[in-house]
Amino acid sequence: MKKIIPTILFLLNLTLIAQQNQLFIPPVLTGTNINLNLQNGTYQFFPGQITQTMGVNGDILGPTLILNQGDYVNFNVHNQLSDDTTIHWHGMHVSAANDGGPHTVIAAGATWTPSFTIMDKAATYWYHPHLHTKTDLHVSKGIAGLIIVKDAEEAALDLPRTYSVDDIPLVIQTKAFDNNNQIVNHANSDTVVMVNATIAPFVEVPAQVVRFRILNGSSQRVFNLGLSNNENFYLITTDGGLLNTTLQTTRLQMAPGERAEILIDLNGRENQILFLKSFASELQNGIYGATSPGMNPNMTMNGYNPNSLNGNDFNILQINITAQNSNPVTNIPATLANDIPLDESTANITRTLTFSPQNMGMNQLNGNFFINNSSFDMNVINYSIPLNNVEIWQLQNQSAIAHPFHIHDVQFYILDRNGNPPPATEQGRKDVVLVKPMETVRFITKFEDFADDTVPYMYHCHMLTHEDGGMMGQFVVQSSNTVKENQSFDLNIFPNPASNIVSIQSEKPVTKIRLMNMTGQKVFEQNFDFKKKMDINFSKTGIYLMEIYAGDTKIIKKLIVK
Ligand code: C2O
Ligand code: CU
Ligand code: CU
């Protein structure tokens, strides 16, 4: 008898593990030349069943891009799908022309070649298609990838950062499938939970501090993340950067589009098993994922029920803890960054955006949603924002369902929710905020660096059904003196075209020189003391706009470097 008991336990344990599939880890692409091929594929989500998919450099999802702040990166995005699409760098601060919104279509068969300097803070961002009315189709079919930005501030911290060893990417999604195991988009029957396209996944991690980079890449579903046994974990980043101090918590609500990096302390836990779960039973009604997606439980949504995920707790990832490795991080750092939020008193304007249902009343969850009573129109610019404006956006949700609001170009700071400070988990840099039914959320942000009179940036609900249904608007950021030769003092730049050294001779003392490339990105900036003549050494060829400042006067010259 004594021998039988351990054997049974062993078998039980094996069965538990055998039900799980090893978590797929997307490969890494890094450096300053990134090639992305968007392609059709097939994938076995269910053993032996072929599902038609879309992926980047593969059948499903896309490689994780690891980019360094300050690097100038060239992308080749080759569209090998049989459909037009776009690729948007969600959360990243890039010019409108490089942003990959719905105006920057990559036709089937074509290649798009944006290039830009990585200006973002260390955090986890992502890329995904953004073709108007087809975003959900292309994302649901599989196109989504993570972007890890590294910077010096993050590098100085003792954090886990060995990809796939103690730094684990988690793209959490739910998808809907039809009876032939094909992915259905614009559907509320998303009963299948997956991480990195793996259903019922397990991951092996060492018994030390482990970092998880989490994206809610679902089309609609909100997760209420936590660990089995309500264990503590530690939030270190929000969407667009490190928090100033590590935040211990047992729950993290994540809406579609949101990212977070968390640490879990697994010291001394070898051979134990832990689950990352969604405690969806705790979601309040009026959130997609709760028992009722509308704040009034009598409101129904087509196809939402029955669905075993709605309002119920479920497992997302099984974490199998193995031996500590040879170079472990064993402590949770207490302090992280020194990020100073924008102050409310610096705002130039408050804009109010009201969300409302197209169908009033009890059937509203089955219709589209408006922002300020209108639906997205490719030909209408909703806001023209002066470059360098600091703005408060007041989001008023007058509908019965929570909307994850997202804005391109910027990171923002949440000022308040219904007049109260946001929870600690939302006090960092953000680009998505879940606005609950009948709630008013205010955030503050600054529109800096990139101006373009014609190519707009988007703001929208990140429930992709709502976005595709027109819950989106667009804005341009305008510089008062873009490409104007407003010469008001004598100035010579020579030679021009130049080979690499340019001399500037000025009547007035030059205080600053800034160089913009033709897509409006700043490639160089330097402040000067008084000098009547100076030489600048350029290493890169191209056509630039050189902005020469003498105090508050500015001259813009076109400069060609050969
Ligand atoms: Cu993640 Cu406008 O998108
Ligand atoms: Cu975005
Ligand atoms: Cu919405």
Image (tube, rainbow, N blue to C red):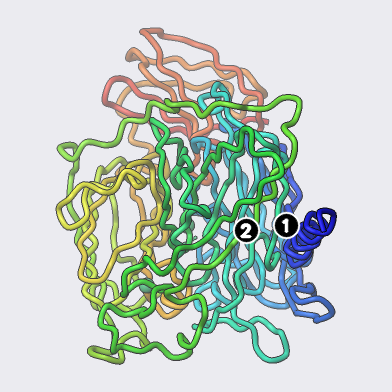
Whether residue 57 is visible, yes or no, is no
Q: Mark 1 belongs to which amino acid?
A: Leu
What label sits on residue 23 in the rendered view?
A: 1
- Left/right placement of residue 508 relative to residue 255 reads left
Picture quarter containing residue 275? bottom right
Q: Residues within 10 Å of mark 2 (few under 14, many from 20)?
A: many
- The answer to whether the residue labelled 2 contacts the one labelled 1, judged by CB atoms less than 8 Å apart, is yes
From the viewer's side, name the closer residue of 406 and 322. Answer: 322
Question: In the image, residue 527 lies at what x, y percent?
Answer: 40, 17
From the viewer's side, name the closer residue of 457 and 153. Answer: 153
* Residue at the image point whose x is 70% and y is 35% from the top: 162
- Left/right placement of residue 83 relative to residue 135 reads right
- Disc 1 element: loop
* Residue at the image point whose x is 55% and y is 26% from the top: 331
Mark 2 to mark 1 CA distance (whole Å): 8 Å
Label 2 vs label 1, nearer the camera: 2
- Disc 2 element: strand
Q: Mark 2 belongs to which amino acid?
A: Leu
Question: In the image, residue 18 lies at what x, y percent?
Answer: 79, 64
* Residue at the image point whose x is 46% and y is 73% from the top: 312
* Residue at the image point whose x is 53% and y is 67% from the top: 314
> Compared to 534, does 416 lie above or below?
below
What label sits on residue 317 in the rendered view?
A: 2
